[in-house]
């Protein structure tokens, strides 16, 4: 396990931007999406009554219809999903790294205390600790003690190792080890108080995780409920209403680009499908971020939940025979 430096984060952001640009261009090209004010949501390639595609010079036109809106939305969503993958990977890997450091600090300090209580000198206890699995702590402490054995200053070795581990708690651990090394006969008191402190922090974190974890399920359930409602509205309300014939007053209105000139039955269902699809994507992304902030205290760590929710949304809308985009 390694920690990705800031340069990797910037590379992930640049890669995500490139993926978004390429997927957007591909979606608009393949889906033949045209902007028709005031309807800016992708909902198909526009056609005139004769069936020919419209241009800016052959108005008036009918509202767009057809499956190209579904294709445009799907390509855009897949591009968004792929764009989030490198960002989610880098940020979640760094989150796991820091969480591993935090979880191993109590056990590391407790073993150091037990070794020194048995008569082992502190540097020797640290060397013995490097043979145990404390996650990233073992490697960095091993480097620090190797430097110390080669004549490097003990304080500088520990401080550098603590800074490389990048966790705020580890900076405190480094200072505690240095103070214990300089305390002589009071080394036991210094280490014992630190063990009690970090054990209390670890117990608090475990309790917080157990109490907040149900919020993850709550967000997933809310997204699923939204998708179910979208399916019901599209299949049971929008579809049947669209199949109704126009009233005499509505059919007598001239065709223009004004939204007030169209009855509900003149607006194709795919337009509403696009609205629900984009809303579902936004709910999936921000729902995952909210989960990360609440449960893990890190919004970027919640991107893994955003990816899972995006996959669910894309599947529900595009699954053969049962997807919302295939609803007739």
Image: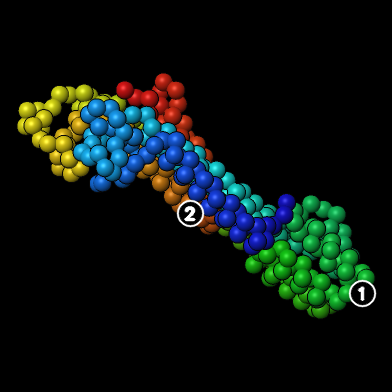
Indicate whether 301 appears above or below 249: below
Residue at the limit of the structure toward the top, as seen here: 321
Badge 1 vs badge 2, beta-carbon distance below 8 Å: no
Residue at horizontal 18%, vertical 44%? 258
Q: Few, some or many C-alpha atoms within 10 Å of disc 2 (few <14, some 14-19, many ≥20)?
A: some
Residue 218 quadrant? top left
Q: From this viewpoint, which residue is outermost toward the left?
A: 249
- In this view of the protein, which residue sits in the foreground, 143 or 326? 326
**In the depicted view, which residue is nearer to us: 25 or 193?**
25
Real-space CA distance between mark 1 and mark 2, rounded to the nearest whole angstrom: 46 Å
Q: Quadrant of residue 189?
A: bottom right
Residue at the spot x=10%, y=35% of the render? Answer: 253
Secondary structure type for disc 2: helix
Classify residue 196 as left or right of residue 212.
right
Q: Say which quarter of the image contains residue 283.
A: top left
93 vs 272, left or right, is right
- Specify the label residue 297 is tagged with: none
**Residue 279 percent coordinates (x, y):** 36, 43
At horizontal 9% and vertical 28% (from top left) the residue drawn is 247
For disc 1, the marked residue is 151
Report the front residue among 176 and 17. 17
Residue 177 visible at all: no
The C terminus - image quarter: top left
Describe the element under mark 1 as helix, strand or loop.
Answer: loop
Q: Residue at x 58, y 51 (%)?
A: 15
Q: Residues within 10 Å of mark 1 (few under 14, many from 20)?
A: few
In the rendered image of this protein, does residue 225 appear above or below residue 212?
A: above
Residue 160 placement (x, y as % from top left): 77, 71
Residue at image mark 2: 294
Q: Earlier in the sequence, mark 1 or mark 2?
A: 1
Residue 100, given in percent of the width and then of the height, sits at 68, 54
> How many dots with numbers?
2
């Amino acid at each position: 396990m390694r920690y990705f430096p800031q340069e990797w984060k910037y590379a992930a952001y640049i890669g995500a931007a490139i993926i978004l640009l390429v997927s957007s261009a591909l979606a608009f090209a393949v889906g033949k999406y045209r902007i028709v004010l005031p309807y800016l949501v992708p909902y198909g390639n526009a056609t005139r009554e004769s069936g020919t595609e419209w241009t800016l010079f052959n108005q008036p036109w009918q509202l767009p219809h057809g499956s190209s809106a579904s294709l445009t939305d799907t390509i855009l969503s897949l591009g968004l999903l792929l764009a989030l993958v490198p960002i989610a990977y880098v940020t979640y890997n760094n989150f796991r790294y820091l969480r591993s450091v935090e979880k191993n600090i109590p056990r590391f300090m407790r073993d150091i205390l037990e070794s020194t209580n048995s008569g082992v000198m502190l540097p020797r206890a640290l060397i013995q600790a490097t043979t145990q699995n404390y996650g990233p702590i073992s490697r960095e402490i091993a480097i620090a003690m190797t430097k110390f054995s080669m004549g490097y200053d003990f304080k500088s070795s520990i401080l550098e190792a603590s800074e490389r581990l990048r966790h705020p708690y580890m900076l405190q651990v480094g200072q505690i080890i240095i103070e214990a090394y300089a305390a002589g006969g009071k080394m036991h008191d210094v280490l014992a108080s630190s063990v009690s402190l970090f054990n209390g922090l670890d117990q608090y974190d475990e309790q917080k995780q157990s109490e907040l974890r149900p919020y993850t399920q709550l967000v997933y359930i809310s997204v699923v409920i939204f998708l179910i409602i979208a399916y019901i509205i599209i299949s049971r309300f929008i579809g049947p209403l669209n199949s109704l014939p126009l009233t005499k007053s509505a059919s007598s209105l001239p065709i223009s680009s004004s939204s007030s000139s169209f009855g509900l039955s003149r607006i194709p269902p795919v337009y509403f499908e696009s609205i629900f699809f984009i809303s579902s994507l936004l709910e999936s992304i921000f729902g995952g971020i909210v989960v990360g902030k609440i449960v893990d205290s890190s919004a970027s760590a919640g991107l893994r939940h955003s990816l899972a929710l995006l996959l669910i949304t894309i599947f529900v809308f595009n699954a053969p025979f049962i997807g919302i985009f295939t609803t007739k």
